[in-house]
Structures are given as structure tokens and as C-alpha cells.
Image (spheres, helix red, strand yellow):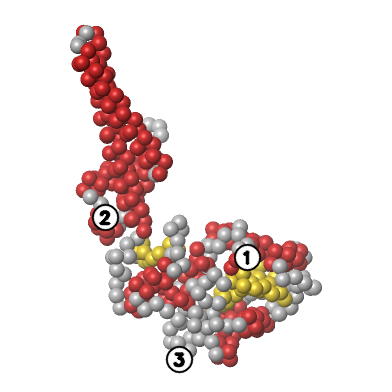
Amino acid sequence: MIGNTTSGKSFHGLAQYLDGDRSRVEWTAARNLMTNDPGLAATIMRATADRSRFVGQPVYHLSISFAPEDRPTRAQMEAVADRLLERLGLQDREAIFVAHNDTGHAHLHVMVNRVHPETGLAWNRWRDRPVIERTCRELERAMGFRVTPGRLYRDLEHPRPDLALSRTITPGERRQREHGTEPLIERVRSCAPELLSARSWEELSARLATHGLTLHRKYTGIVISDGETQVKASRVAQDLSLRNCERRFNERFPDRLAPPEIERVADAVRSLGTYEALMARARAAGDELVRARSALAIGERTHVPTGALQDLRGRVREAESRVALTRNALTQHSARSEPVADLRRTIGVAVDRMLPHELRLFQRLLKPPELALAQWCRSHVRELLRERSQPAFS
């Protein structure tokens, strides 16, 4: 078992995260409350916390994750949570249990009010994690669960912790959680035991893929991404860092697991190349239309034979048709892709920031004309930055 803890300000924000999606809630239970509804419990906890004006973060969030091999019953999960609350000295505080079923392993969330409902005194969480580690080890042995120690526990059987989870989250991630959005790092931490049992890069990548996540290298480390945001693997667990994974897998990070950002930049270059080709065709069609109309006007003024006039009018109609087709293709392309100015800026900035090994991967994905276009975008962005760095007044 792994116990993770955080503190916060908003009971309702955490309750929304725990209970906002009812499809993933397996069951709920309450302690020292008259309701099992997390939303109503948050309202009661907020009223209790308001009795203490000096507590800035009255919310205590304890999450308990079981190893994928374990299949605890509800009674066992509640017993684990009750024992942890007792050992922490929180057995008389208001608490709500919410069990989720959206991962490959059992896990339970506990929202606790640090403020006592009668005395109004706040519980001090100092040195709570060592207590949680010791209690988890005792419960694992007593209940026959797999021993999965965290970074604060070492013994002869586990000289190096199997699951060295980082406990911190950024202010931005905390605001996400308070607004009901699950930060990516918490999604990844929830499946950390499953990831840490992988024995190769391919297996690790496959297990991430089952959760809609990808793994790629960035600078001197590796990051986990959901396609929109990313988090350093070492923040999730120390044993998921690039160095530790390479040592455990006995293999360097493979190039075939190329960063998705490089693929997206290559797609952007192809999209911009398509736009440039369509624009060239549109300009050529427009020039041909101008020439055809000019020839028709001259023919009408000089009274050329009727057959020749018909040919000139047919040439104009064909030119007008090509112009309409190219304009329609440009409109459809613009509807499917980003604005051209944004594409150029995205490509230029991304290519300018690529490291040598990333550039080598990037070059393998594109044809020479597309590489020339990417190079032009980088030069264009650099020129804009150079002009912006000039003083406004001389």
C-alpha cells in the first residue's frame, strides 16, 4: 500500500474531484458525519473549519493505493483507512471516504477536516508521512497484502524503496484540483505501482498507453504526457527517472519512443507545406485567369473570327474553374488547420529549441523541401525576436 497526502483550502473543490464523476465512484462512507454525500459533507466541514480563523488549509487529503495484485474488499479498505486515521490522531475528526474504480488497482481517497468539530483546534500534520509508512507496512503484513514501501521506509527485504513517490504538487496543479480538474500528476501517481512493475521500455510504454498516456524524452530526462499537458516522470516516482529506468531495464532510452512534440511539429510543417503549395496553385490560376481575360478582351476589340472567340471564352471559363477549385481547397485546408501565422511561429520556436538528438529525429520525418520550410520558419522567428530586442527609441 502507498499513502499519499496533501493539504488544501477548498473542501468543495476536493469533493468535486472525488465525486464529480459518479461513474468512477465505487462507494462512499463517512466518519463523524451524518451524511455519506461528499458534496454535503464538504459544506458541513467548511462550517466546522470556519470556527478556527487561523487555519489556512483545513483540508487534509489522504489517498491510499493498493498494489495491482491485491484485491481488497470494502471492509478491508475501510479498516485500513480507520487504522491510519487512528494512528495519525484523526479518529475524532470529520472524514469522508470515496473509493474509485477508474484504475487497474484499488485505491481510496479520504477527505479529512483538520479542525476538531467540538474544540475548534486544528490537527498538526507534522511528521505524518513516517507514521503512514509504518502503519502501511504493519497492515500489509497483517492482511497479507503485497509490500510496496514508499521513499520513507527501508528494511533488509527492500534495500531500495520500490515506490519512491514525490509528494509535492505545484500551485497550478493545486488550483486545478480545487476547481474540480484532476491534475495529470495525480492521474499518473494513481497508476504508479503498475508502472513501477514494468521490466522494459516497451512494457512501460504499453502500460502508459492503457491509460491514454505516452512517454518521451525531453532534455536530460523523460516526461509523461496525455497529449495536452506533461509531467516529469521523476516527479511521479524517483524510480521512474531516466537514470533509474535505464539502470533497471539495462537499456538506454530508445529513439523509437520519439517525443510526440516532434511528431506534432512535423505535422505542422506538412500542413504549412500544403498551404504553401495551394497558395502557389492559386496564384498560378489567378495569373492564368488574368491572361485569359486579357486575350478575350483583345479578341473582342479586334473582331477575331467567331470560332476563335469561342476558344478564348472557353479558356476563361477553364481558368475561372481552376481559381474556384484552388480557393475551395484553401478554405477547406484553413478550416482543418491552425492559422498560417500561428503555424509559422509554432514551427520556428519549436525547431529553434530542439536539441541535437531531437533535430536528428525531426529530420528523419520530413522531406528536403519540408526541412527547408522548417528552417525558414526558424530564421523568420529569430529575425522577429531580434527586432523585438531592439530599443524602442534611439
Q: Quadrant of the N terminus?
A: bottom right
* Residue 124 coordinates in the image, percent (x, y): 66, 74
In primary-sequence order, the first of circles 2 and 1 is: 1
Residue drawn 43% across the image and 74% down it: 195
Mark 1, residue position: 22
Q: Is residue 225 shown above or below 156? A: above
Task: Say whether residue 245 is left or right of residue 182.
Answer: left
**Residue furthest out toward the front:** 307
Please identify the quarter of the rendering in which residue 334 is found: top left
* Residue 211 coordinates in the image, percent (x, y): 46, 67
Q: Is residue 84 shown above or below 335? A: below
The residue mark sitting in front, 1 or 3, is 1
Q: Say which amino acid is labelled 2.
A: Leu
Residue drawn 36% across the image and 71% down it: 242
Q: Residues within 10 Å of mark 2 (few under 14, many from 20)?
A: few
Question: Disc 2 and disc 1: Cα gap in Å?
Answer: 43 Å
Mark 2, residue position: 365
The residue mark sitting in front, 2 or 1, is 1
Question: Disc 1 and disc 3: Cα gap in Å?
Answer: 42 Å
* Residue 2 coordinates in the image, percent (x, y): 54, 79
Task: Say whether residue 312 is left or right of residue 68.
Answer: left
Q: Quadrant of the C terminus?
A: top left
Label 1's element?
helix
Label 2's element?
helix
Residue drawn 28% across the image and 46% down it: 374
**Residue furthest out toward the top:** 302
Mark 3, residue position: 156
Task: Say whether residue 381 is left or right of residue 236.
Answer: left
For the residue pair 271 and 262, the one nearer the viewer reads as 271
